[in-house]
Amino acid sequence: MHIDAARIVFDDRVSDDDALAGCPTAARIPQREEVLNSRHLYQIMVEERDEAVRRLNERGIYPGVHYADNTSYRMYRYAAGTCPRAAQASARVISLPMHLGLSEEDVRGVAAEVEDICR
């Protein structure tokens, strides 16, 4: 499947406001309308990142933990608490699988599983 097709399916199923209406614990990462994103990564925010990753893993889906707050590393711990938005993003952002080996059915399956676990 072409990456644009994957993006379109995810946009329709996962990131669309209507698709997430029944998912109070997941949200699309906001982007300015004038910015065209390549979507080489498809990231969403979830309330309980580690729990969402665990539940998706149980279903054979392996999202990435894309962002770790720098203050979680020993060399920057002295600055813990100075970047609350970064800490919040670190605790919530996951990257959904997106690659050329995914079929449209795979993409729809991932989207359906995300919808299911966030209810």
Image (cartoon, rainbow, N blue to C red):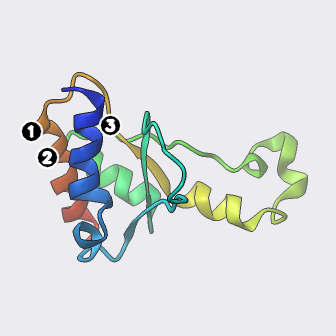
What's the distance in space between the residues labelled 3 and 2, CA to CA?
A: 11 Å
For the point 40% across and 66% down, the residue is 27
- Let me know if residue 112 appears in the view: yes
* Dot 1: element: helix
Q: Which mark is residue 109?
A: 2
Give the residue pinned by disc 1: 105
Residue in the foreground of this view, choosing between 17 and 62: 17
* Dot 2: element: helix
For the point 22% across and 22% down, the residue is 101
Could you tell me residue 40's position as x and y percent? 43, 33
Type of residue at label 2?
Answer: Gly
Give the residue pinned by disc 3: 97
For the point 26% across and 23% down, the residue is 100
Characterize the local packing of mark 1: few (<14), some (14-19) or many (20 or more) Cα atoms within 10 angstroms: few
The quarter in which the C terminus is drawn is bottom left
Could you tell me residue 75's position as x and y percent? 86, 40
Type of residue at label 3?
Answer: Pro
Residue in the foreground of this view, choosing between 49 and 37: 37
Characterize the local packing of mark 2: few (<14), some (14-19) or many (20 or more) Cα atoms within 10 angstroms: some
Q: Are marks 2 and 1 in contact (CB under 8 Å)?
A: yes
